[in-house]
Image: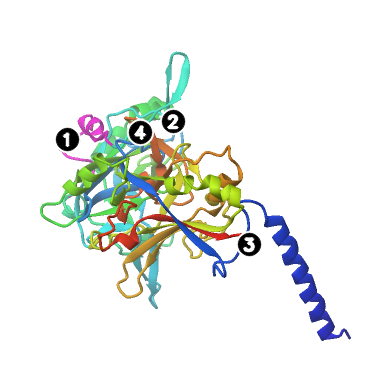
């Protein structure tokens, strides 16, 4: 048998050698990594120039999440989110069958879109109690929801001067789609008009489990339980004429069909004096959002009775070009702050708002002034952070975003710390990856309200110190609906500061108010002002 004490000594020596080797490898200007306890490290704080920037109408097609509803915020105002989407047959050139002479051909036309939800409890009979996720506003809020056939031909691209360009759709195009919506000429109403006001005049996002009961071949009831989803009964006669009685050529190919049936337009309005809310929905996921037409047609068999019918189903998917449509009624204080930023001294408060909202521009001016000194003195960077403190007084009664995203604004790309962080999610939420880079909200255990957002930019700072050719770029800070989405959407109207905005911010209806770097020393919140904090190892 081996001597246990001897093995422990060997392991100890090996560990010391390994740590020494690692230390030699990291001992370069701007390098050196020590744990989060900051033992024997010296901290320096640098002033930061940060100011607001309005996000004017921004590209909103191709988002992975889309808002639908009305979100009313005490801090920012009211945002109304509509939606528009192309449609496509699940099967090209479907065989409709012979429907002549059949009474009540269509049994149902149902538009369905799943909600984000999770199971709270499962009962002994197999039924489940759900809670909805990604719902913002009054839990019992209602909206007036109208679904129309769209009269606008949406395209993925267009040609100009012999070149092909991506077709962009923007958050402010409500008027375009509303002006060309197709009203059901038979009723003069939307496609989802129904005797029940619950699906149009007083629509609400229900957390109830859906129970479908069908008959099997033996005539017995078969129960299917479905997680909460939007289910709207669309006008049967409209789809009988538009789809089932359409000339076969109109259903022959995706291109022809999308010209014939140009899509659906979801219009959102207030429901009387009721409080409202908004949901984030995944319309883009294949098979998620669809119209299911159940109807009867004469059997195709030549040996059966000529009048014998069979049940048939035709599915139309919401797919292709899609766009979020926003209308904002901003609070005066918020509107003034984002339209009149102090680009010289910085703003006292930073307003981050998703959708067609706002972001903050962050410039590491104090750090830049010390760069030559840092390089000359060979200070080793162990950790660098930006800690953004939340103005809790201004954020009362307002939903807080779980996360913010700091990026290279000049080049519209992630900073190095984001790119090199391979940490996985700390929860079952796939959007909670990159926990070292972070930007995750810190919540007070007593008040349950957010206090700070901390973002690590250690590698970003090291890179600037080590390489004099690396530019100290301006940084952008936004709320994010998905930390894994890093692409940007183009602004309709560019300015001298930004020409695009992160698409993950466009997805989110939420906002937060943070303390900037320009807080007067006499202000009670002076200690919460934004500064860059860097921990160094300083050579003796």
Nearer-the-camera pick, 200 or 315: 200
Query: Mark 2 or 1, which is nearer the eye?
Result: 2
Residue 188 x %, y %: 15, 36
Residue at point 28%, 42% (across, down): 342
- Secondary element at image label 1: loop
Nearer-the-camera pick, 328 or 224: 328
Calculate the distance from the C-alpha at mark 2 to the C-alpha at mark 3. Answer: 72 Å
Q: Name the residue under label 1.
A: 186
Q: Residues within 10 Å of mark 4 (few under 14, many from 20)?
A: many
Calculate the distance from the C-alpha at mark 3 to the C-alpha at mark 1. Answer: 86 Å
Residue at point 46%, 61% (across, down): 429
Indicate left or right for 304 with 142 as reference.
right
Labels 4 and 3: the sequence-earlier one: 4
**Is residue 289 visible to the viewer in this orientation of the structure?**
no
Res 540 label: 3
The boundaries of the magenta stretch are 172-194
Q: Is residue 412 above or below residue 116?
A: above
Calculate the distance from the C-alpha at mark 4 to the C-alpha at mark 3. Answer: 51 Å
Query: Mark 4 or 1, which is nearer the eye?
Result: 4
């Amino acid at each position: 048998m081996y001597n246990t004490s001897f093995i422990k000594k060997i392991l100890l020596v090996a560990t010391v050698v390994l740590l020494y080797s690692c230390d030699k490898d990291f001992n370069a200007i701007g390098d050196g990594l020590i744990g989060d306890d900051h033992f024997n490290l010296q901290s320096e704080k640098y002033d930061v120039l940060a100011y607001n920037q309005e996000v004017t109408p921004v590209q909103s097609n191709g988002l992975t999440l889309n808002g639908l509803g009305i979100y009313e915020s005490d801090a920012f105002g009211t945002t109304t989110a509509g939606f528009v989407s192309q449609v496509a047959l699940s099967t090209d050139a479907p065989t409709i069958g012979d429907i002549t002479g059949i009474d009540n051909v269509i049994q149902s036309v149902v538009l369905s879109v799943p909600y984000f939800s999770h199971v709270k409890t499962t009962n002994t009979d197999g039924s489940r109690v759900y809670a909805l996720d990604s719902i913002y506003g009054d839990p019992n809020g209602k909206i007036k929801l109208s679904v129309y056939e769209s009269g606008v031909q949406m395209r993925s691209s267009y040609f100009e001067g012999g070149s092909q360009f991506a077709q962009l759709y923007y958050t402010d195009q409500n008027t375009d789609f509303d002006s060309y919506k197709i009203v059901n000429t038979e009723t003069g109403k939307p496609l989802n008009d129904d005797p029940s006001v619950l699906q149009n005049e007083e629509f609400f996002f229900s957390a109830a489990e859906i129970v479908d009961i069908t008959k099997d071949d033996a005539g017995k009831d078969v129960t299917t339980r479905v997680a909460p989803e939007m289910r709207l009964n669309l006008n049967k006669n409209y789809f009988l004429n538009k789809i089932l009685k359409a000339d076969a050529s109109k259903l022959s190919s995706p291109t022809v069909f999308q010209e014939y049936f140009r899509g659906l337009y979801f219009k959102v309005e207030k429901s009387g004096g009721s409080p409202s809310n908004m949901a984030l929905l995944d319309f883009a996921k294949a098979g998620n959002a669809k119209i299911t037409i159940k109807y009867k047609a004469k059997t195709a068999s030549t040996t059966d009775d000529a009048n014998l019918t069979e049940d048939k189903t035709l599915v139309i998917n919401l797919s292709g070009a899609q766009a979020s449509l926003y209308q904002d009624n901003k609070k005066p204080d918020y509107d003034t702050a984002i339209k009149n930023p102090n680009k010289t001294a910085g703003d006292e408060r930073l307003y981050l708002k998703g959708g067609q909202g706002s972001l903050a521009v962050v410039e590491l001016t104090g750090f830049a002034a010390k760069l030559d000194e840092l390089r000359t003195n060979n200070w080793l960077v162990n950790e660098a952070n930006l800690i953004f403190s939340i103005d809790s007084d201004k954020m009362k009664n307002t939903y807080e975003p779980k996360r913010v995203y700091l990026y290279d604004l000049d080049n519209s790309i992630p900073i190095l710390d984001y790119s090199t962080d391979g940490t996985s999610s700390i929860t079952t939420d796939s959007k909670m990856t990159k926990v070292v880079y972070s930007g995750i909200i810190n919540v007070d255990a007593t008040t349950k309200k957010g206090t700070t957002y901390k973002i690590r930019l250690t590698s970003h700072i090291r890179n600037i110190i080590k390489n004099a050719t690396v530019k100290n770029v301006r940084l952008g800070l936004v709320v994010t609906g998905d930390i894994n989405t890093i692409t940007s959407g183009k602004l309709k109207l560019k300015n001298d500061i930004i020409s695009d905005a992160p698409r993950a911010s466009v997805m989110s209806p939420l906002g937060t108010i943070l303390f900037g770097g320009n807080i007067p020393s006499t202000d009670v919140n002076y200690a919460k002002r934004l500064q860059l904090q860097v921990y160094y190892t300083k050579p003796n």
